[in-house]
Amino acid sequence: MEKIGRNDPCWCGSGKKYKKCHCDIDEIIKEHELLGEIVPPRSIIKNKEQIDGIRESAKINTAVLDYVAENIREGVTTEDIDRWVYEKTIELGAYPAPLDYEGFPKSVCTSINEVVCHGIPSENVVLKDGDIINVDVSTIYNNYFGDASRMFCIGNVSEEKKKLVEVTKEAVYLGLEQVKPWAHLGDIGQVINDLAKKNGYSVVREIGGHGIGLEFHEDPWVSYVTKKGTDMLLVPGMIFTIEPMINMGTHRITHDETDGWTVRTADGKPSAQWEIQVLVTDNGYEVLSF
Ligand code: MF3
Ligand code: CO
């Protein structure tokens, strides 16, 4: 890394002098790095202008989720949800990030019951009484990215499935409480995995959260089976998602060979997921989209 003078412009692009911007933060990062810890590359530490842009995109993302929440009910198809997401996102001046992303054919992921994630909306899939569904919305606005997902319970859902949905939401909140400067990503994974285990559930290992903002998926990759004190150091200006997938039975999953996307639990038991987009601030966190 090239040496920056204290009076030079900061590397973050803020236009401020280095000594008035990231100089102090860099000192602390260096101390952690010398201890052998994983520290974030500068490319994923956002400046104020970028954070403001990502916040706007995330706001639209939340508004689209709110719109889904107002309309989702028994009898609608996942294709209907896809249309709502597309139309609402466009109406708000943004674009749905999943559409054509690595060949994904729709604007949103809809994952019902044993579908863990990446379910593809279809006119043949009708929401029925007792279903639990994850709706995962991602937005591009002015080249900035928003991403969050929620669970919805359709009609009379069994106590067993309702509890899975509630515990998974609680897991995200517990994870969120760990987010502050100089903590570690592993702190989040530890509390989420502990809570899942305590309830007799398991956490999906192969799919996780991700850095986000200037790209849909950036570093770091966020696992929910990591240990406290391990994994990447959290630094102000980092933005990532907390999105654990928690299964009622085995943690093992299968990938649909036919559509190339749908991920299911290997034992066919239900899975739940909530996703929150969070910014590491100077003294804690700010929720950007949920
Ligand atoms: N929102 C999902 C995520 O958190 C997006 C999956 S990619 C898609 O990564 F193409 F399936 F949309
Ligand atoms: Co995501």
Image (tube, grey):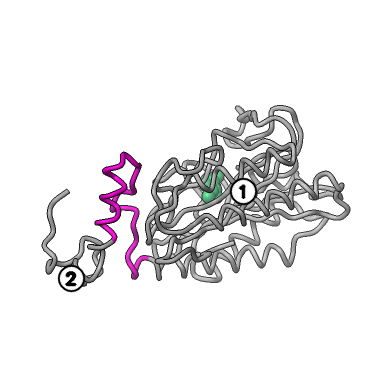
Horizontal relation, residue 99 to residue 273: left or right: left
**Mark seen at residue 149:** none
Q: Locate residue 29, reporting x and y percent.
A: 29, 52
Question: Is residue 256 shown above or below 187?
Answer: above
Horizontal relation, residue 122 to residue 278: left or right: right
Q: Is residue 28 magenta?
A: yes
The response on whether ligand 1 sits within 8 Å of label 1 is yes
Q: Nearer the viewer, mark 1 or mark 2?
A: 2
Name the residue at 24% across, 56% down: 27
Residue type, label 1: Cys
Which is nearer the eye, 71 or 189? 189
**Mark seen at residue 17:** 2
- Nearer-N-terminus badge (1/2): 2
In the picture, residue 61 is in which quadrant? bottom right
Name the residue at 66% across, 67% down: 66
The magenta span reads 25-50
- Count residues near mark 2 (Cα–Cα under 10 Å), then give few for <14, some for 14-19, many for 20+: some
Q: Locate residue 233, reporting x and y percent.
A: 39, 49
User: Which element carries disc 2, helix, strand or loop?
Assistant: loop
Which is nearer the eye, 134 or 258? 134
Name the residue at 34% across, 70% down: 49
Circles 1, 2 touching at the beta carbon (< 8 Å) = no
Q: Locate residue 217, reporting x and y percent.
A: 43, 48
In the picture, residue 14 is in which quadrant? bottom left
The CA distance from mark 1 to mark 2 is 43 Å
Q: Number of labelled discs?
A: 2
Q: For mark 1, what is the residue?
A: 109
Residue type, label 2: Lys
- Count residues near mark 1 (Cα–Cα under 10 Å), then give few for <14, some for 14-19, many for 20+: many
| Quarter that holds the C terminus | bottom right
